[in-house]
Amino acid sequence: MPWKESITPRDVCNLLNEALARDRRAITTLVHNRASCNSSLANHDTIQVRHHKAGDHTVYTIGLIGLLNGMFGVNEDSEGCLEIVFEKDGQDWDEIVRFDVKEPAPKDTPKDAPKES
């Protein structure tokens, strides 16, 4: 198969879901794995990095989905378009059900807009 010149968020989700179907344990482990990173990466405009306090300093970690989301940008709430759908099982590692593309949040209706009846 030749290289693709462009990809969409749906293309990424389809590939992740195919990989998940082939080896759920490996993909779950990969997605849950996070690497420490510096503040320069943490302050990137589109790459999503987790921040948490550890004593008197901030720790930054990055995961696969945060990096992939960086390719597609963020919405006005700084959220990426790729999401993981989990099934809560009460364990430390919740099971991944699928990967999906977030639907854009509905825009607020202006106060002076006519109401539908």
Image (cartoon, helix red, strand yellow):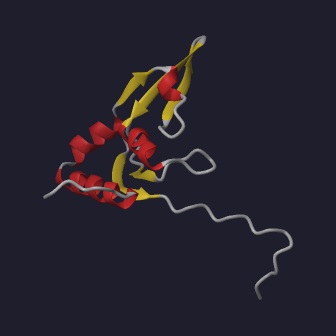
Front residue of 90 and 38 = 38
Q: Quadrant of the C terminus?
A: bottom right
- Looking at the image, residue 49 sits to the left or right of residue 20; the answer is right
- Looking at the image, residue 107 sits to the left or right of residue 61; the answer is right
In the image as oriented, which residue stretches furthest toward the front? Answer: 5
Q: Quadrant of residue 52?
A: top right
Q: Quadrant of the N terminus?
A: bottom left
Front residue of 47 and 1 = 1
Residue 105 placement (x, y as % from top left): 61, 61
Is residue 32 placed above or below 5 in the rendered structure? above
Residue at (54%, 27%) from the top-left corner? 51
In the image as oriented, which residue stretches furthest toward the bottom? Answer: 117
- Looking at the image, residue 56 sits to the left or right of residue 34; the answer is right
In the image as oriented, which residue stretches furthest toward the left? Answer: 1
Residue at (64%, 65%) from the top-left corner? 106
Residue 10 placement (x, y as % from top left): 37, 61
Q: So how many labels did they put on this image?
A: 0
Residue 25 placement (x, y as % from top left): 23, 43
Is residue 86 placed above or below 67 in the rendered structure? below
Residue at (37%, 39%) from the top-left corner? 91
Front residue of 5 and 70 = 5
Is residue 51 placed above or below 69 in the rendered structure? above
In the image as oriented, which residue stretches furthest toward the top? Answer: 56
Residue 68 placement (x, y as % from top left): 38, 44
Residue at (29%, 43%) from the top-left corner? 28
